[in-house]
Image (cartoon, rainbow, N blue to C red):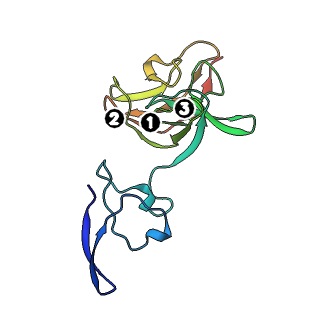
Amino acid sequence: MSQQFKSFVGGVWQLISAITSSAGAGDAGKIPALDAAGRLSTTMMPTGVGAETITVIASEALTAGNFVNVYNNAGTPNVRKSDATTAGKEANGFVLAGVSSGASATVYLSGLNTQLTGLTAGRYVISTTPGGVVAIASAPATTGNVVQEIGFAMSATTISFKPQEPVTLA
């Protein structure tokens, strides 16, 4: 149910609905409302305020929480799961919502990945399980694997994503 407010417009009282997202200049002067999550939509924020994201086509199905690699697929940026078994598949970001192959994915390039489970406080690296992570104590150790620290677990479900330079094991 949208919130409504009484406003005097052109000599007549009218009910005006608050908006939960903005389409741009045409919404100037309108009253904002919080979205279903209790937050202001990033569409109402000035440029540069909000999550640092890009929208990219997924070349495989992605699950909420996956750490992902953005890559050049025949001249078109695509996104796939990060994978410590293959150099070139390092984590560039993560997804908070699952998408199917061929669909547009919103990739977060920094921030909190809140769609994880089973973590303990500490440092994490990308896993040999595509899209996953492991505690740094369990980092990949096989020749040719990639070790890339991706952040610090703040809780059982959240990692603060701050990727480091990957190192390919010799």
Neighbourhood count class around disc 1 (C-alpha, 10 Å): few under 14, some 14–19, many 20 upward: some
Task: Report whether 66 appears left or right of 71.
Answer: left
**Quadrant position of the C terminus in the picture:** top right
Closer-to-camera residue (72/87)? 72
Task: Report whether 1 appears left or right of 10.
Answer: left
**Residue indicated by mark 2:** 154
**Quadrant position of the N terminus in the picture:** bottom left
> Nearer the viewer's eye, disc 3 or disc 1?
1
Query: Looking at the image, which residue sits at the far bottom?
Result: 11
Task: Report how far apart the C-alphas of labels 2 and 1 lie in the structure.
Answer: 20 Å
Say whether disc 2 or disc 1 marks the residue closer to the N-terminus: 1
Say whether disc 3 or disc 2 marks the residue closer to the N-terminus: 3
Say whether disc 3 or disc 1 marks the residue closer to the N-terminus: 3
Q: Residue at image x 63%, y 21%?
A: 86
> Nearer the viewer's eye, disc 3 or disc 2?
3
**Residue indicated by mark 1:** 97
Neighbourhood count class around disc 3 (C-alpha, 10 Å): few under 14, some 14–19, many 20 upward: many
- Residue 7 % position (x, y): 27, 77
Q: In what element is the residue under mark 1?
A: loop
Q: Residue at image x 42%, y 62%?
A: 44
Closer-to-camera residue (35/130)? 35
**Residue indicated by mark 3:** 68
To which quarter of the image does residue 5 belong? bottom left
Q: Which amino acid type corresponds to the residue marked 1 in the rendered image? A: Ala
Closer-to-camera residue (116/30)? 30
To which quarter of the image does residue 12 belong? bottom left
- Residue 26 % position (x, y): 48, 70
Asked if disc 2 and disc 1 are in contact, CB closer than 8 Å, the reply is no
